[in-house]
Amino acid sequence: MRDTFLWNLNDPVITPEMFAQTLVEDYSLLPTYHSVIVKSIQEQLSDFKAHMVDVDWKPPSSAIETTQSEDLKIEELDWIGVGR
């Protein structure tokens, strides 16, 4: 079985364990799948957290090149940041 869902990292109520229990019950899966689902969710969350960008982080000034053209100000960044 393959399923896709969006996980809210800021939700303190629903844990991977609770979600897995509901999934096992809803799909009438064997109870042994509970630990497999929990492990999979925890691994994916851990991997995601390892690649998160701190939203308060600012690029070094050398990474920003500013060009003035009449009333238009254009800022070019050397990189693209993906935040939460």
Image (cartoon, helix red, strand yellow):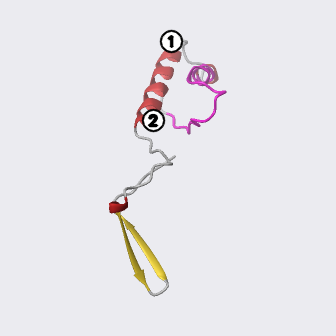
Q: Which residue corresponds to mark 2?
A: 49
Do labels 2 and 1 touch, CB within 8 Å? Answer: no
What residue type is disc 1 on? Answer: Thr
When the figure is inspected, residue 37 is found, relative to residue 79, above or below; the finding is above
Disc 2 crowd rating (10 Å Cα; few below 14, some 14-19, many 20+) is few
Q: Which of 64/16 is in front?
A: 64
Q: How many marks?
A: 2
Q: Is-magenta flag for residue 1?
A: no
Which stretch appears magenta? 3-23
Q: Which residue corresponds to mark 1?
A: 32
Determine whether the residue tagged by mark 2 lies in a helix, strand or loop. helix
Report the magenta stretch's main SS.
loop
Q: State the mark number for residue 68.
A: none
What residue type is disc 2 on? Answer: Lys
Of all residues, the one furthest to the bottom in this rendering is: 70
Determine whether the residue tagged by mark 1 lies in a helix, strand or loop. loop
